[in-house]
Amino acid sequence: MNITDLSPRVQELAKVLTKFVENDCIPAEKIYEQQLGEGEERWKTIPPVMEELKDKARKLGLWNLFIPKGHKEGPGLTNLEYAYLCEIMGRSAHTAPEACNCAAPDTGNMEVFLKYGNKEQNEKWLKPLLEGKIRSAFAMTEPAVASSDATNIETSIKRQGDHYIVNGRKWWISGAGDPRCKVFLVMGKSDTTQPKHKQQTIIIVPADTPGVTVVRPLTVFGYDHAPHGHCEITFENVKVPKENLILDEGRGFEVVQGRLGPGRLHHCMRAIGFAERALDTILTRAMQRKTFGRYIAEHQTVMHDIATSRIEIEQSRLLVLRAADMIDKIGAKKALKEIAMAKVAVPRTCLRVIDRAIQIHGAAGVGPDTSLADMYANARTLRIADGPDAVHLMQIAKTELQRAPELLKKAHL
């Protein structure tokens, strides 16, 4: 499927978004970094250029594009339609998604509120998130346990009268370093006597609640991603009212699965965008530099890399579009295999394409003068974020093995 197969409205949105990303967001990347400054200032400063981009995105009708069809707060796009637009935003991964209020983890958290939040919770937290006035974080991963199996989570959420007390240590909590981060959605165990998938609970914790401490920001291959950051946080006897529960005790897994289905795919959609950008850098570099008397593009090995990159990107895009289409038609829960296949394949493709781009750029590819090293760090992180490859491969294999009993009945096999 091509974007020309979609509605005229979506095609127009894609056209407007492409101009915005190429003419505004990508040129703003270096300005953004300059305005952040250095040292501790990087964690206190919101670059003015981002607010300028957000204002323009609103005026262009490019705001909250991610909100699924069926919710009055969004533009009414299907997952398939959004996939095309999300890819365009992925070409400027650090600026365009936030500029359009489509950046993780806010998108996933807003979907939690949209699906499971009550009126009071949504008035207090969803409304300012939708308006881009605050940011948020999702606190699940922990340093002391293998969090790829979320039943291991040890943070406790215990009822005490009309309140809950939260105790635990979390890390790699994206967005927690941002001074605009005003709320955490925290996953922990509320009742260890229940079946293992009924022990977990999600609760709203305002960032300024006593006992919440941002211990340190963590770097990704040396990148701090300030002011957003990926932080280690402690919750020490954090007291929040019972009204802050999302749904009810023991329904944490239900909430997480509802949050992660489309969210995993959003990462893949954006990743296709920066894989395309990496390929663009291969093409321009290869046509500008000469080695051994010929343009780099004329060497057979480079031509092979260009062709292979194009094939792999197209394959990955089709996986993403198929998964998005299946979410629209049968729901994320029934499209787990397709989502998992995209989640594994797309970051791997991106890493290969970016690695080729780095190789063609030579020393410049690993330095600060191009965005390739940063892109590589992001793509490598995606193989861990929202579940590591190994977990998704297990899911795919289990689904495939369900076909085995019928296959065994076929004599010719």
Image (tube, rainbow, N blue to C red):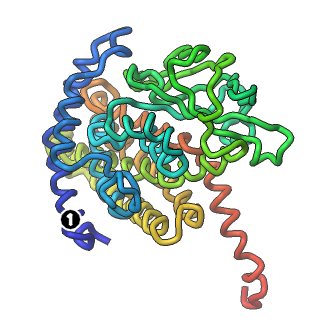
Extreme-right residue of the structure: 193
- The one of 354 and 295 positioned closer to us in this rendering: 354
x then y, percent, for residue 326: 48, 69
Q: Is residue 273 left or right of residue 197?
A: left
Q: Is residue 287 left or right of residue 187?
A: left
Question: Compared to 412, does 131 lie above or below?
Answer: above
Q: Is residue 305 visible?
A: no
Name the residue at 56% across, 53% down.
258
Q: Is residue 218 visible?
A: yes
- The one of 278 and 162 positioned closer to us in this rendering: 162
x then y, percent, for residue 376: 40, 37
| Quarter of the C terminus within the rendering | bottom right
Q: Is residue 231 left or right of residue 299?
A: right
Query: Mark 1: which secondary structure?
Result: helix
Instruction: Count up the numbered dots.
Output: 1
Task: Determine which quarter of the picture holds residue 225.
Answer: top left
Question: Compared to 355, does 218 lie above or below?
Answer: above
| Quarter of the N terminus within the rendering | bottom left
Name the residue at 17% across, 61% down.
12
x then y, percent, for residue 11: 20, 64
x then y, percent, for residue 60: 16, 47
- The one of 315 and 54 positioned closer to us in this rendering: 54
Query: Given the image, on which type of amino acid does mark 1 rest?
Result: Arg
Q: Is residue 164 left or right of residue 17?
A: right
Label 1 sits on residue: 9
